Image (cartoon, grey):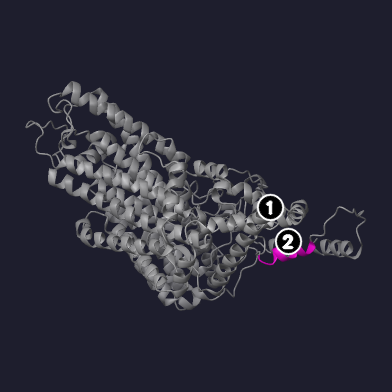
Amino acid sequence: MADEADAELAQLAAHQLDIEECDDWLDITSLVKTGAQTLASGELIKPESLTLLDAMTSIQVMDARLDMGMLLDSDLAEIAQWDINRALTLKDTLWIVDRMLCCEMTWHNSASLLQTIYTCNYYIADDLPSAIGQAEVTSNKERDLVLYPLLVATGLCCRQVWNEYSRENVYAEEDVLLGPTVLRFFEDQYSLADTMRLLDGAQAYLETMRGQEEGAAMLLAHVSMRRRWLTALMYLSVEYLSEDPCALDRSMAELEALAAEHQAYRSTYTEHIDRAADNIVPGVFDAKCMRKFPSLAPIKPKELLTLSEAHATLARLVSGLSLVRKLLRIESVESLVHFFQGVSRQVEPLPYVRSLLISVFASDGRVQLSQPLPEFVRRAIRELCGTKLMGEEGDRIDLFYQEAARMLVDWFRTLCQNAPRQRRIALKYLAGWDSLQGEAEQLDIWLYTQRHPHVLPEKASDPSLNPFWVSSWAYHMKLVLMGGALMTGIRLDVYLAYEFPQIFCYATQIFEAHALHLTRMVQMSGSDRLHEGKYRLWTRQGVSDLESKAQLERWLSIAAVQKELATALWLVSHACERLGIFRPPWAKGRSKLALEVCRTQESEPAQSSRYALRFRAFSRLNSPTPLTFDGWMTTKRQLDEYPISDLFVHAARILAEAKTALDKCKRGFEHTGGEEFIRAMYYVVLANSVALAKLLKSDVVKSRALAVSGADACAFREALLNEALAQTDSTATSDMTKAKSKREKKKRAARNEAAARAHEWQADVDQLVSSGALNIAWTTAADRHPDWPVFTF
């Protein structure tokens, strides 16, 4: 088949196709070759302006059977060598087991079952050998006593993971399902007890072969690790954790033992793990198995992990499951918020870990397997607001608690999803939190005007005498969600460099509103003029005023530091835009069509439309007051009046203040779950401070900062655009040449002078950037705080 295809291609290449030429045709061969030189094999051609926002609003049609693959002669020869009755050696068995580990860990990285587990022909064979686990009757001991017991145990492990995936619908990529159907996990043939019996038989057989045949010791280690992994997965299921108080400790003990055994295995057999396999068993794995299930074929290929990568993934998976114990031992809602925010920022958290965290956190109407959902919300409000709340429970209060519990739990569950889903769902939930805040305000008014009117003095202007605690809590949570949704776009590369000034300006406003709100809540918590008979709603002991105020001050410290950091990055990004380093992608066009598009995109209505689309989810909220496009432009013009060097200096001063604030507050976060967040913010502030100090010492930056004033960058871009359009329009050029009046000559001279200055400015900037003298870039520290960028110089 492959030979016929090659012959046909050769025949087509030898004959000229009969195509009638046309005078209007344009030869783009050289253009395509030049553009394709920078593309990797199989890379799609997309314009630089295509961002995640554009991709989400477009439709990309793909064949559902893209990864079925083409059967070549080599594939047919490989398939023909499959024989389920082939006599295996221990060395052959070890290769198959290693390859299955690669398949399993690739599946844990969100590949399809058809691309991983089901590529093993032993796994999907219709007729299983009848002698599995029976040493007395089998004639193929390595297959029946070692390989199949490990495959059956692998199947039960996959079943446990699959149950969690199905329960919480968690996956890592938007377009790759973890498996459209379950074909076989061996659970219908073998129970857990049967599987353990098979593993015992495999271990006994391998003990007799130790030292006699190569690979026996490594297979023994595989059997032991598989037993511990299966046991840990069973104990970690929500059913076990809910019914057996000792299940958590047992699962953690198994995971710790597994981690120790796995580390010893990797240390002992490093050479085996790192080197390429040299004893491949032909026909065992069918890479084109998806051709047997065309309707279930994945939509894009997924390469298997190497053996070294598979072991690294297993180690990361075992380590990540320790988060379950940490989650179940958290006692405060504040620590829960920090915990889930930390999980959301982890580097590629595996889907099974995230799915299990969701199940353990909230299942069957309970939080952390014990606390009812309404009580969880009472606990959240009580911690933040103390004991000064409301009176007896009633239907209206219960209804609010039920709605607030649903919103809060859904947010925590969302933080365990992948980053794109986190941002998308958070933007959608903002409207719900806005409505919840409105309901909370009405509830506060009802409580303090009808049920307990003596608590709230009439027309009291002092915020300490207006304890609207429920609505204050709801507004606080909404602001936390707003800040997270906006800054998650940094991690996802949603924003282009020229958008950074807008993003950080809007972030500054959100964090400033949050800090002001928390300041008011601190004033409320410090009041000693409330009615002596404070009504207490709680069934548990109320939180003391000191504990509540301490938590408010911690949240205030976080909001204040984030506001300072956003302000500093806003000034730096605005200065970089004025220097000409950050340019919109359409500003690089050279054809007349591209230049016309550039003129359209640079117009104020186009900028206003992009701004409205970017911040649409925030502008629809009742509070805080949204930053409109006109407000943004006014602020931008005010910054344009300052020299660029002053912007850099002021940003450095703000970062120094943020560092001082972190130094003061970091002790207050001990044992609250917020220590990691403070350390991450400290790193971001310190890294940006160092880069900014280095930038301020640069003579190149100093000279450019003094040479470029106000809105020079925008004016230069406009002058270059006008000149480029004039050069592409012969009529306009002719009219300019024929201009005879003094006014026209004066205008032409001014345009020429502006264009000359603009050309000089652009040439200087391009030369400095290309040489590295003015190379300013933005990166995110994935292992620190990926939602905040660090600029490098």
Residue 445 percent location from the top left of the image: 23, 26
Residue 257 is one of the magenta-drawn residues: no
Instruction: Kindly state the secondary structure of the residue where label 2 is placed.
Output: helix
Residue 398 percent location from the top left of the image: 26, 27
Q: Residues within 10 Å of mark 2 (few under 14, many from 20)?
A: few
In this view of the protein, which residue sits in the foreground, 676 or 70?
A: 676
- Residue positioned most to the top: 450
Which one is earlier in the sequence, the residue at label 1 or at label 2?
A: 2
The boundaries of the magenta stretch are 29-38
> Which residue occupies 54% across, 76% down?
275
* Above-or-below relation of 718 to 614: below
- Residue positioned most to the left: 532
- Decide whether the magenta segment is chiefly helix, strand or loop: helix
Residue at mark 1 to residue at mark 2: CA–CA distance: 78 Å
The amino acid on which the numbered mark 1 sits, given as a three-letter code, is Glu
> Which residue occupies 51% across, 41% down?
613
* Above-or-below relation of 142 to 740: below
> Which residue occupies 31% across, 35% down?
405
Q: Disc 1 designates what residue?
A: 744
Q: Disc 2 designates what residue?
A: 76
Residue 332 percent location from the top left of the image: 23, 47
Q: Residues within 10 Å of mark 1 (few under 14, many from 20)?
A: few
Q: Is residue 355 visible?
A: no
The amino acid on which the numbered mark 2 sits, given as a three-letter code, is Leu
